[in-house]
Image (cartoon, helix red, strand yellow):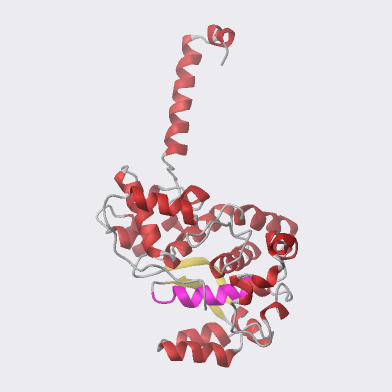
Amino acid sequence: MTETMEQKLTPLRLGLAVIIVGLIITGVVFGKNPNPIQSIATNPDLLAKTANSSTSLDEAVTPSAGVTLPVTWGDLGAKLVEAGVIDADKFKALYQQRGTWTEEEQKLLLNTANGQIKITRENADYWLNLLWALGLANSNPILDSGEMTDPRYGGAGGFASTGGWSMAKGQPMDHYGRHQLVKLTATQQALVDKISRGIYRPCCGNSTHFPDCNHGMAMLGLLELMASQGASELQMWQTALVVNSYWFPATYLSIAQYFKDQGIAWVEVDPKTVLGETYSSNAGSAKIQALVSKSQNGGSGSSCSV
């Protein structure tokens, strides 16, 4: 502000300016959000529990009861199988070897009338693989003309998110962006493009717009699905933070501790801020973890493989 402008400020205007600056600092620096992430849960008991100040930090970040997301899976599992993106026999064998194949997992893969997605500590890895398949296979401009196809990287087939998908019939690139599984309007596509550029993941330094690993590809699939079903931008940011937290529980527990040390509850953080490069990228989350004074417990998160 120049000296001339300062001279023109009346005491009233100056007072209003101070108030406005104070509001900006409160909202931006501390990330206060009138719509906490738990607002996407449909279970009011879970809402009350996670918002309770006495709730343990790990319960606030990844509730043991799980979180029901504002998005329906429907028949996408069956469509992925029909298209050969997922070889049902391979997929079932993978989880049987791990000793975790359940009736619910079979329904999500083969049934055509599945309800809303509910993510839990137990099924987060399963949803990671289902959504990975969706993000890999669904036709989308982000795959066709985004960073994945940049000539500097030698083609889209050499990334963990593509070459690492071993559950398909045929080769992974046989399915890369080849199937019209989720249709988006121009407005919905613009929303996916915008949000995908702001969501990072602790396993690497790229945003979802550059889905070079399974977590990025799975998040892209989730964003496409949510947008196609009319989810709002806020719901998509909130849901992305919930899902990332289940995929990387130890990392987000540390981030939650970082905010708690500053007097900010997890329900008050701004999802868009937390999902950004400063907190959620590999380098950003590592810096936050280094700043956290108290050691954390919790799973290390899922790897970048099936």
Q: Residue at x 65, y 72 (%)?
A: 136
Per the rendered image, the range of residues in magenta is 122-135
Identify which residue, 175 or 171, lies in the foreground: 171
Q: Is residue 34 magenta?
A: no
Q: Is residue 98 left or right of residue 111?
A: left
Identify which residue, 255 or 67, lies in the foreground: 255
Q: Is residue 130 magenta?
A: yes
Expressed as whole percent of the image width and height from the top left, the position of residue 66 reads 39, 69
- Residue 116 against residue 103 in the figure, above or below: above
Q: Residue at x 58, y 67 (%)?
A: 222
Expressed as whole percent of the image width and height from the top left, the position of residue 298 reads 32, 66
- Residue 102 against residue 150 in the figure, above or below: below
- Residue 131 occupies which quadrant of the picture? bottom right
Q: Can the viewer see residue 182 in this picture?
A: no
Q: Can the viewer see residue 288 in this picture?
A: yes
Q: Residue at x 35, y 51 (%)?
A: 290
- Residue 295 occupies which quadrant of the picture? bottom left
